[in-house]
Amino acid sequence: LNAKIATLTTDFGLRDPYVSTMKGVMLGICPGAAIVDITHKVKKFDISNGAFVLASAAPFFPPDTVHVVVVDPGVGTERRPIIIETKRGFFVGPDNGVMTLAAEAQGIRSVHEISSRRFMLPHVSNTFHGRDVFAPVAAHLLNGVDLMEFGPPQAEFVKPNLSKVVKTDDSLAGEVLHIDHFGNVITNITLHDLKDSVRQFLSVEVPMREIRLKLSKSYGDVKPQEPIALIGSHNFLEIALNQGSASSILKINVGDKILVRRSISSE
Amino acid sequence: LNAKIATLTTDFGLRDPYVSTMKGVMLGICPGAAIVDITHKVKKFDISNGAFVLASAAPFFPPDTVHVVVVDPGVGTERRPIIIETKRGFFVGPDNGVMTLAAEAQGIRSVHEISSRRFMLPHVSNTFHGRDVFAPVAAHLLNGVDLMEFGPPQAEFVKPNLSKVVKTDDSLAGEVLHIDHFGNVITNITLHDLKDSVRQFLSVEVPMREIRLKLSKSYGDVKPQEPIALIGSHNFLEIALNQGSASSILKINVGDKILVRRSISSE
Amino acid sequence: LNAKIATLTTDFGLRDPYVSTMKGVMLGICPGAAIVDITHKVKKFDISNGAFVLASAAPFFPPDTVHVVVVDPGVGTERRPIIIETKRGFFVGPDNGVMTLAAEAQGIRSVHEISSRRFMLPHVSNTFHGRDVFAPVAAHLLNGVDLMEFGPPQAEFVKPNLSKVVKTDDSLAGEVLHIDHFGNVITNITLHDLKDSVRQFLSVEVPMREIRLKLSKSYGDVKPQEPIALIGSHNFLEIALNQGSASSILKINVGDKILVRRSISSE
């Protein structure tokens, strides 16, 4: 590989030595690697949250990037370590579904189990496969080691249990995927879903209340602290407050159901 | 450019994929770039806070560094994206004043509006110019693209509304710019301001109380938990507690007025 | 040096410009350096916490890595800045014991005082030696400057005051070194300590209560939210909850005494 770019997505936080330990291992094997943190603040053990964040960032990395993911509640149990090869790059992590969303968006070419001990650290702990398995394997991938060397292809792999948008004639029922740092509420409803049922205004039913929102283009289309709906940078329907937190003000949380209806007219 | 160093200063926090997405875009355009995080914990939408942090770090980067700044409450509105060229490097971000303090300290050579779509991502969202405009433009700058290619020079640019120190015969009236991680209180009063009016002791009036402080050289000049004044590493008057938080103990916050008087004698 | 890898371990947090300022200085002197953050969330002024995190990460970095450490409550006082040369790399920071644990594990070759002003920034503040002394010295080390150029060897250096495990015939008395992001409780008791006195079950006395734990291999050996003991990735005895926080549920904190006894039989 020419680029030698790896990314890391974990639920390790930034206080402990875990993330840097993985980087030390990787730089020892592939000295010129550029290692980019996607985030280390995935909600602990939360595979859906990790899947969302990774799928959101991965498309913007160059071809041949190796994405390492360690959101791994089953570390040390029988869940397998895998490499997913896509049309655009590689994903290295546990076979628990956390990488599937991002990988499928790139087109999956093959999935390999990581079974050869040759590319792991000499001592493999049962509690930190990020350091002992995924980091060294990713660095060897960057060095150009062939996929078959890591282990045999496997036909099956785990898919994450993500909720789907349900459409009726006059509504869309979706769910809140993510609340970002600004309090923007990101749903699983896409522009494509919206096209058939919504025009300029929409009515959004969130827990305990219903809000009528203008479908806008940018946060600045309304006054500060006023709510709007827009297709955000993730390409999902987003409920936001200009310069404020929609999540706190409208009391919306991850996992909340969202019902969108076309609103009849402008005010 | 030889160095190919870029920095990022944002209010994005570290939980979401936003920062890494920008890095992915930059590495796709300029594979060898070294990208350094200045901070992603600028107070949300707070242009003054971003301006202070950037101006504090930028002088320590080598020539030709490209500083990318995304503290951008007006994203998607008519505020323009600009490049500021200085005698020492480049600043890329919104024309809202956040880069002006740091850029003026380096000597501004020119300001260009970013208008050419050629150097932006193919789809420019209205909510994430960091990813769609500033990141790719910065990477193209690192690659040596000429300033004129990005857009025309513009004569005017926004200056931040920073408060000035007011001097009288026996006092200096300033303001708290920043409280750091240790609780050190950083004011906008410089060594130069102090020279005329203060010698070894000073009397500082903070909200609700007046404190007499020794002007010291290092935190260790007083006992643990005792307050001192010193010229800090930012070159501003700083009120600190040895191994403690001046901000919490003395109840001083960002924006508080600070009145400094020469204190008559030693104890 | 070929590798040109440096690490940073500080108690600076991630909000202020301090960390990036150090990186700017280093990249100005050694443009190709790969600078890895070990952590910037060492507990403020806490030399033991810094020593533990550094000693945990450092073994996984390649030879010739330069580890820069700034947990420095005595900055600007008479404590000396030093370089510790080991059989594997270098440590640069204050002579307050924070680097000793990690350096001794690698085998110390020499300790040099940093006294030559040539390798410091032109103006050395009394409050930020990370920027003015340690960062430039580390970058010059990466560039291959000889140790003798920085200052004379010194025979003595500060050792941290770490508690030792006390063994009796039927028990081990240790201490909690660290609580990680997941709430895992990491003690100072090693596998070697345990070998003589514990087999499959152990009884752990923590403040106010006694718990009987199975010595397991991975978190997944028990049901979610159930406690276990295991030798963690740090090679220390760890008390953990599968997918939960042992620290909060069992109310164990850093510094707590831990008494381990062999438990008589299985349930």
Image: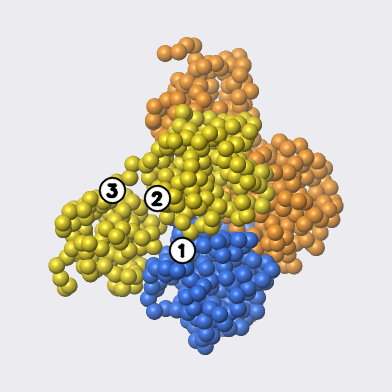
Chain colours: A orange, B yellow, C blue
- Residue shown at 32%/63% (left/top)? B231
Q: Residue at x 70, y 62 (%)?
A: A31
Residue C183 % position (x, y): 52, 58
Name the one closer to the observer, B65 or B54. Answer: B65
- The residue pinned by badge 3 equals B164
Identify which amino acid the numbered label 3 is placed on. Lys
**Residue A50 image point, x, y percent:** 61, 44
Q: Can residue A266 be seen in this view?
A: yes
| Alpha carbons under labels 1 and 2: distance apart | 21 Å
Above or below, comparing residue C255 to residue A150 in the picture: below
Label 3, residues with CA under 10 Å away: few <14, some 14-19, many ≥20: few
Badge 2 marks a residue whose secondary structure is helix
The vertical placement of B61 against B255, above or below, is: below
Q: Look at discs 3 and 1 and give the one toward the viewer.
A: 3
Q: How far apart are marks 2 and 3 (CA)?
A: 14 Å
Q: Which mark is residue B52?
A: 2
Q: How crowded is mark 2: few (under 14 residues within 10 Å), some or many (20 or more)?
A: many
Q: In the rendered image of this protein, does residue B139 appear above or below residue C99? A: above
Front residue of this view, candidates A27 and A18: A27
